[in-house]
Image (cartoon, coloured by chain):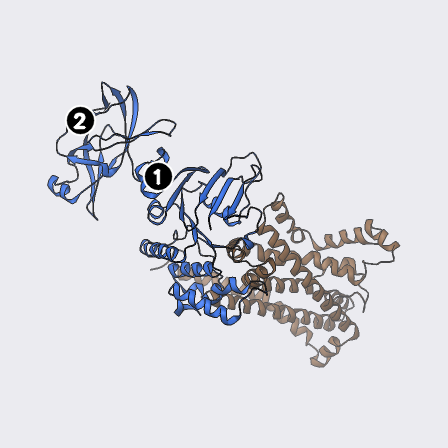
Amino acid sequence: MQRIGDAPAVRRGLIGAAVALSALFLLLPLVAIFAQAFAQGVGVFWANVSDHYTLAAIGLTLFITVLTIPVCLVFGVALAWLVTRFSFPGRRLLQTLIDIPFAVSPVVAGLIYLLLYGRNGWIGGWLDAQDIQLMFAWPGILMVTIFVTCPFVARELIPLMQAQGSREEEAAVTLGASGGTIFRRVTLPNIRWALLYGVILTNARAVGEFGAVSVVSGAIRGQTNTLPLHLEQLYQDYNTVGAFASAALLALIALFTLAAKAGLEWRAARREA
Amino acid sequence: MGIRLSQIAKTYGRPGTPRALEPIDLEIASGELVGLLGPSGSGKTTLLRIIAGLEQADRDPAGTIHFGSRDVTEVHVRDRRIGFVFQHYALFKHMTVFDNVAFGLTVQPRGQRPSSGEIRARVHQLLEMVQLERFAQRYPAELSGGQQQRVSLARALALRPEVLLLDEPFGALDAKVRQDLRRWLRHLHDELNFTSVFVTHDQEEALELSDRVVVMSDGRIEQIDAPAALYRAPANRFVFEFLGDVNRLEGEVRDGALTCGEARLAVDLPEGPQELLLRPHELSLEAAPSAAAHLPMTVTAVVPVGAEVRVELAADWLAEPWLATIGHGDFERLDVRRGQRLYALPQRWHRFAAEGRPATQPSLA
């Protein structure tokens, strides 16, 4: 028996189109990145990657990412917990507010931070008087990166925690478990895969963020240049191989992230089977 | 340990909205097995969750909950020392059966926590009691529904609670397993002698299992009684209708007889419109009317399965069809077939005043 819409011509047509489009728009650019990066041989690629400024950019990017992830993790878990386990006025509004960083263009986010915390900004003026500089320094980059990435963990957790309900937690509390014990032994094991998945997405975005960071960083080579900003500068300087070497690094991080995500999904599927 | 509730009420949402639970007083004796019976939305689960402490009762009126002489109104669930069995088991999915049962013991504060050897012994004893020792290393997803519910019972009993609360414990199971588990719970209750309260919407379950049944509707207690008394003397129409199938007869009373179309039944009631209620087993069927009752009906369906034969009856003068349960002897004697015309002879009927409270139940025999 044949299912509806399963005629051989239709099937082949759809699969063919999907493969062709994926190759054209996804696979080919990826291949091009690596081809360009290695266009003048491994030696030149390595020279570019081990360049002083490139290393500084890599270091700053990793530093920002390492700081961003724990903040987003704690924020996401707390928010998901609040939204799914308690009922209070404004709960729906809060759920909508979580999505603001997704809805707002990152450049706009960067500008708002500049407006607020810049030297002439509302809060920035006061901070400047205290001799604290946030904008055009790593704290500013960290702030906008957190802003842009903070919804990922919460967004992963909320549907899951809603679906699971609080029965297991209720059972644990009737058995005399304290709040901390319940979180550690009941809640966390139930959400750990979603949590890890949220962290992977947060990581991917934090590493690759360009728009918001470019507004607040000032792009000082060796000081406030993240890898994506550094890449763009190299490209503007007609250093194509250098730009693509950095791009290859970013692409590698992305590929690694995707592999980790696929691995998690495979594990999750196997656990359910 | 007895349970005493006084003036326990619950409103969800803003004060002033209709109450899920009207102020309720209830006393449960130590060692008693009490069923909270009612349709969905009657407040029975809310009441159970308030007893457990999973739900907070209203502050106004300021109700109190006592376990024995101990006032637990403001005591957190964690410290009430109850066992709670959830409808859908609520087992910890990521733990083995053993770890599930051991959970309550392992989360005790350091000073009171038994040694790991004691925990192991206790868990094995509990698993033996629920006949699941072989499954100690399995995960909940690998067990059947009935087995999962037994694990959940063992888990709830691990801390030797004096009060066991069960929320529709057998609701999600099929009929045969439910029957077994009921018997088994009754046995366990008699053996371990805790005080139990369970919620059910199944009349048969409530009547079979409970020492006393609390019938609830619309957030109120309609009646509290032993199963036999409840069935024999329902306090009002709601209880009567909820406890079993009901046949309705509406008509005008004039000159000592209630008439409705071609139907006629001799009654000793004041003149005017009246409504009588009859149980299916309080009817017999005959080929001819009697002097007191002329209730002609047509057989629409016959189910000759089980100890009794269920006969569905319809007539022009009836708004809803009637149900009669008759013996196999009568069934064969009358040779009941679909489409046959028979006469119903009520042995007994019930009548509830419009407001529902008093009931009159004369016998026609």
- In the figure, residue B273 lies in which quadrant? top left
The residue depicted at 46 percent of the width and 67 percent of the height is B122
Q: In the visual, does B358 lie left or right of A18?
A: left
Q: Which residue is mark 1?
A: B242
Residue B224, position in %: x, y? 39, 40
Q: Chain of mark 2?
A: B
The residue depicted at 29 percent of the width and 36 percent of the height is B246
Question: Badge 1 local density, few (<14 within 10 Å), some, or many (20+)?
Answer: some
Q: Which residue is mark 2?
A: B292
Q: Nearer the viewer, residue A141 or A19?
A: A141
Secondary structure beneath disc 1?
A: helix
| Whether residue B171 is visible | yes
Q: Amino acid at mark 2?
A: Ala
The residue depicted at 48 percent of the width and 39 percent of the height is B25
Looking at this view, name the residue that lies furthest to the bottom. A43
Secondary structure beneath disc 2?
A: loop
In the rendered structure, the colour chosen for chain A is brown
